[in-house]
């Protein structure tokens, strides 16, 4: 399972950073998940919550930030990809949202830039 | 108690990309063309690799990395053809990654190889996120998976160099259109070369062999430089 091994790698990193900084505990772990990866945010959250037991990060809050691509057009027009994910108040959770987007200025197909990350953004430790 | 926020900024997926770039450098140094075969279970990846070995084995020195979750049947099939074959079991994982390939490369005498064929684990999802160090990403899908398979897996087609639509001779029997699949692949990736193949149509397979040959020749020339 993709998410479990990624969560293990994240947790290994968190533990070694906590040790390097002589942490007594970890309050929170913030992870950024790119919307164009096949990483499922709910599953990575579940795996991290499972893995935080019995180590320095026990009880840490897991915060997942979704990272949206920037939509770019050859004509120079740019737009935050997040805007494409909301129709009224409804969130569209589909990779295809970013793949077939026409530029509102010139009509060409836009290119999604970024959104391929899985980043340990920060950890909040107690010293 | 002192609280302290540490900004980490470590990208777990990019760490794989860095290792993949290192693998590619090693392959380039040895003039090896590396191909990553991605595709679903039963799409025909192993058969295409077998046919490639049979057809190009006289002209090029080939090696194969055969990825599977636990079994080594595919590696056994390919090794029977007398080509260097390294089986790689991913265990829990649904894809090959750059670390597994780095380890496998240590078992191959790269100075003695022109083309390295890497068979990924049967899966159209996770391999899209993981580079291995390959020069060419090839997606193999068959008409028997249903002709909506391309649109169901847009990311792998978006980030691939060649699409092979295999078992085209079975399309009618399974009520699928290879032409629709080709059009879908081009819709997602307009410049992508699409080959419609069947092992019962020698001409269609020859197109694949000549595509690979011309790329391997370029790598060979680079090695001479």
Image: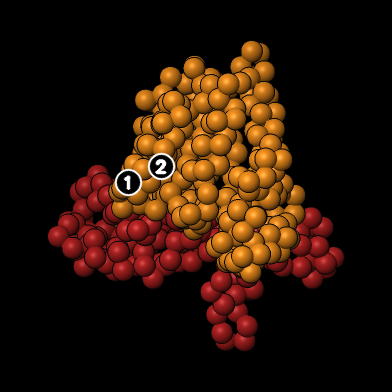
- Label 2 belongs to which residue? B74
Q: Is residue B160 above or below residue A32?
A: above
Q: Is residue B137 visible?
A: yes
Residue that lies at the very extreme toward the top in this rendered image: B224
Residue found at x 66% / y 29%:
B213
* Quadrant of the image containing the N terminus of chain A: bottom left
Residue found at x 56% / y 61%:
B144
Which chain is the one coloured red? Answer: A
Residue that lies at the very extreme toward the right in this rendered image: A106
Image marks 1 and 2: residues in contact by CB distance under 8 Å: yes
Q: Is residue A69 visible?
A: no
- Label 1 belongs to which residue? B71
**Chain B representation colour:** orange
* Quadrant of the image containing the C terminus of chain A: bottom left
Crowd around label 2: few <14 · some 14–19 · many ≥20 (10 Å): some
In-image side of B158 versus A91 (left or right): right
């Amino acid at each position: 399972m993709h998410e479990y091994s990624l969560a293990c790698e994240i947790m290994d990193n968190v533990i070694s950073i906590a040790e390097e900084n002589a942490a007594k505990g970890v309050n929170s772990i913030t992870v950024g998940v790119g919307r164009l990866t096949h990483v499922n945010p709910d599953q990575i959250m579940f795996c991290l919550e499972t893995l935080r037991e019995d180590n320095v990060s026990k009880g840490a809050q897991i915060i997942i930030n979704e990272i949206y691509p920037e939509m770019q057009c050859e004509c120079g027009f740019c737009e935050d990809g997040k805007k494409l994910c909301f129709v009224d108040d409804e969130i569209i959770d589909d990779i295809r949202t970013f793949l077939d987007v026409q530029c509102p200025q010139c009509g060409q197909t836009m290119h999604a830039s970024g959104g391929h990350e899985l980043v340990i953004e920060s950890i909040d430790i107690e010293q | 108690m002192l609280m302290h926020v540490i900004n980490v900024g470590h990208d777990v997926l990019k760490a794989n990309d860095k290792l993949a770039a290192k693998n590619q450098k090693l392959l380039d140094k040895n003039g090896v063309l590396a191909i990553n075969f991605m595709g679903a279970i039963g799409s025909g990846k192993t058969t295409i690799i077998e046919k490639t070995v049979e057809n190009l084995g006289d002209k090029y020195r080939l090696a194969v990395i055969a990825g599977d979750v636990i079994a080594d049947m595919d590696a056994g099939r390919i090794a029977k053809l007398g080509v260097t074959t390294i089986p790689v079991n991913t265990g829990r994982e649904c894809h090959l990654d750059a670390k597994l390939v780095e380890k496998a490369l240590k078992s191959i005498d790269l100075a003695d190889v022109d083309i390295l064929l890497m068979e990924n684990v049967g899966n159209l999802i996770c391999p899209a996120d993981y580079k291995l160090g390959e020069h060419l990403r090839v997606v193999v899908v068959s008409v028997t998976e249903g002709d909506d398979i391309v649109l169901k897996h847009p990311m792998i087609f978006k980030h691939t160099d060649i699409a092979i639509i295999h078992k085209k001779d079975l399309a009618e029997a399974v009520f699928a259109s290879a032409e629709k699949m080709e059009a879908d692949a081009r819709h997602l990736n307009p410049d992508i070369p699409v080959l419609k193949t069947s092992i019962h149509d020698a001409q269609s397979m020859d197109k694949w062999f000549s595509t690979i040959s011309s790329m391997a020749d370029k790598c060979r020339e680079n090695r001479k430089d």
